[in-house]
Image (cartoon, helix red, strand yellow):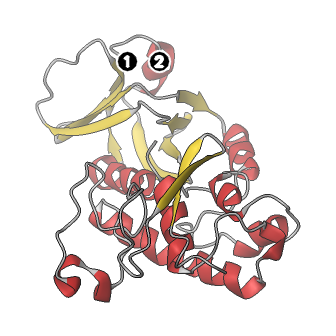
Amino acid sequence: MPEGHTIHRLAADHRERFGGRRVRVSSPQGKFADSAALLDGTVLETAEAHGKHLFLAFEGTGWVHIHLGLFGKVNFGDAPAPPPTDTVRLRIADAHGHVDLRGPTTCALITDAEKQAIHERLGPDPLRDADDPDRAWRRISASRTTIAALLMDQKVIAGVGNVYRAEVLFRHGIDPYRAGKDLTAGEWHAIWTDLRELMREGVRLNRIDTVRPEHTPEAMGRPPRVDDHGGEVYVYRRAHRPCHICAEEVRTAELANRNLFWCPGCQTH
């Protein structure tokens, strides 16, 4: 499932390519056909993201709420757009280009009130400047749940996925099995600040890089990572391989139905 930086990047791409312009909207697959008919010929005013949720604002009509889930894909292309396949749930197009959405968990036309309800059930997002990390801290500091599980709970903090979870805990030397209530406020705010910086770089580069300059392949004289997720990481998907820092074997275990990765030598706090 895409992490929050990908959704914020998609929001920026929609604003850049279609923002303020009248667009054609269709649903070749048919599942969004009624709503697409209402949107066709209207102006796509803006796009925004909160965590893993994408919102597209259409003039006088409402918001298209998109959640990609595990299988959703978004593909941008030039104009003229080729004939769409029957797997395209939503196509947005104008004279300059088009974008196709396939396989999302959610693609629905919603009202302002329905959109607000989604925001209210989500935790603060490190990529939303106005979001308050203290709102997440109040839940974390009162919880016996592990910090690793809390970071993946979108009601606590929105947008963090398995990669950022594993990597930010490594970067701060925190044992992933530590209870939320055992963290200090200083530790939490350091994690939040780091997530904001890492995820902003993720938006900019469209990939996840988490290693510090002194630990890059060039700096350490090691081979670069070869992985379909791209980017340089410390522990994510490096199970049973030596830690870049202490050479201890990186461990993995299942936690809340996701694979957790950590280094027992470096993550001792």
- Counting from the top left corner in percent of width and height, residue 206 is at 30, 59
Which residue of the protein is positioned furthest toward the right in this rendering?
142
**Can residue 230 be seen in the rendering of this structure?**
yes
Q: Can residue 4 be seen in this view?
A: no
- Is 177 positioned to the left or the right of 109 in the image? right
The residue at which mark 1 appears reads as: 27
Residue 168 is left or right of residue 88, and the answer is right
Whether 129 is drawn above or below 8: the answer is below
- Mark 2 vs 1, N-terminal side: 1
Q: What residue type is labelled 1?
A: Ser
Q: Which of 193 and 30 is in front in this view?
A: 193
Q: Quadrant of residue 80?
A: top left
Tell me: residue 211, above or below residue 77.
below
Mark 2 to mark 1: distance in Å? 5 Å
Provide residue 250's location: percent of width, then percent of height. 45, 64
Q: Is mark 1 on a helix, strand or loop?
A: loop
Which one is nearer the viewer's eye here, 228 or 68? 228
Residue 113 lies, in percent from the top left, at 73, 41
Task: Please name the residue shown 45% across and 27% down the image.
Answer: 39
- Label 1 environment density (alpha carbons within 10 Å; few <14, some 14–19, many ≥20): many
**Label 2 Cα neighbours within 10 Å, binned few <14 / some 14-19 / many ≥20:** some
Instruction: From the viewer's perspective, tell me whether residue 13 is left or right of residue 113.
Output: left
Q: Is mark 2 on a helix, strand or loop?
A: loop
Please name the amino acid that badge 2 sits on.
Answer: Phe
| Callout 2–callout 1 Cβ contact below 8 Å | yes
Q: Mark 2 points at which residue?
A: 32
Q: Is residue 214 left or right of residue 83?
A: right
Which quadrant: the C terminus?
bottom right
